[in-house]
Image: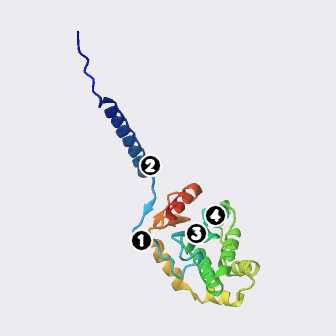
């Protein structure tokens, strides 16, 4: 009669092996997701001192848009992503949101930036209405390369969107390049943080691969909020 060897530790060993395999699979999957992401993580978040900023300045999460008034994708982001972001996080004071000018389209980008800086320095709250209105005036994608950001156009947009500001001062600021140093600072930040396209969105030092993935934007913000 043969004797069967019984090992009371065998079930525990099998369970342990199964757990190890499961953990390994999870690690591999997470590693793959991280590898496939082309987000760029910087050691420091872009400074937002003296930049147009909305929200709670003491918030733990800072979101920054690098935008260009000549950029069709920036217009789309302004119209479709920003309103949701404002509703979910800015209005409640959970984050700060800042805007930094990009000059990828040359003279018109520069003129729009000078105008924005003038409005911001006259009335910080008015900046956001002006920003929205100037993007709204952008031609269709097929015609966005047309020359349209002129001094007259900027004054007309401001007169309709932010009539409370001093329009004569706005015109002088543009023609006299009053805020050229502020625009130059933005350009230096664009170079320092290697901005390659507009809009570029940075959340607490992470430059997003896809600025239009709102679910991912929301995820990163909630992580930053400790949720």
Residue 208 place in picture, x, y as percent:
50, 60
Quarter in which the N terminus is drawn:
top left
Residue receiving disc 1: 44
Give the residue at mark 3: 94
- Evaluate if marks 1 and 3 touch, with contact meaning CB atoms under 8 Å apart: no
Could you say whether the residue bearing mark 4 is in a helix, strand or loop?
helix
Q: Is residue 54 above or below residue 215?
A: below
Mark pair 4, 2: CA separation: 26 Å
Q: Earlier in the sequence, mark 4 or mark 3?
A: 4
SS at badge 3 = loop
- Whole-percent x, y for residue 46 in the image: 47, 73
Q: As rendered, which of 1 and 23 lies closer to the eye?
A: 1
Q: Which residue is mark 4?
A: 88
Asked if 90 appears above or below 6 in the picture, the reply is below
Q: CA distance from mark 4 to mark 3?
A: 9 Å
| Alpha carbon separation for disc pair 1 and 2 | 23 Å
Residue 144 at what x, y percent from top left? 65, 65
Work out whether mark 1 precedes mark 3 in sequence or the reverse, and give the earlier one: 1
Residue marked by disc 2: 33
């Amino acid at each position: 009669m043969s004797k069967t060897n019984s090992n009371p530790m065998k079930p525990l060993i099998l369970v342990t092996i199964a757990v190890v395999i499961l953990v390994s699979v999870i690690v591999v999957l997470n590693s793959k997701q991280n590898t496939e992401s082309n987000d760029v993580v910087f050691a420091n978040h872009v400074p937002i001192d003296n930049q147009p900023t909305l929200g709670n300045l003491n918030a733990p999460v800072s979101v920054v848009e690098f935008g260009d008034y000549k950029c069709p994708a920036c217009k789309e982001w302004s119209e479709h992503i920003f309103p949701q972001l404002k509703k979910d996080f800015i209005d409640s004071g959970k984050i700060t949101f800042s805007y930094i000018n990009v000059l990828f389209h040359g003279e018109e980008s520069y003129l729009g930036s000078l105008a924005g800086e003038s409005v911001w320095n006259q009335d910080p709250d008015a900046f956001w209405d002006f920003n929205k209105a100037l993007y709204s005036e952008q031609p269709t994608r097929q015609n966005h390369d047309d020359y349209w950001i002129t001094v007259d156009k900027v004054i007309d947009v401001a007169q309709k969107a932010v009539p409370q500001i001093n329009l004569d001062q706005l015109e002088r600021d543009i023609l006299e390049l009053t805020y050229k140093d502020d625009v130059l600072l933005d350009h230096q930040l664009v170079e320092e943080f290697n901005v390659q396209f507009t809009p570029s969105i940075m959340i607490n030092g992470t430059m997003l691969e896809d600025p239009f993935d709102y679910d991912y934007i929301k995820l990163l913000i909630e992580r930053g909020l400790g949720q």
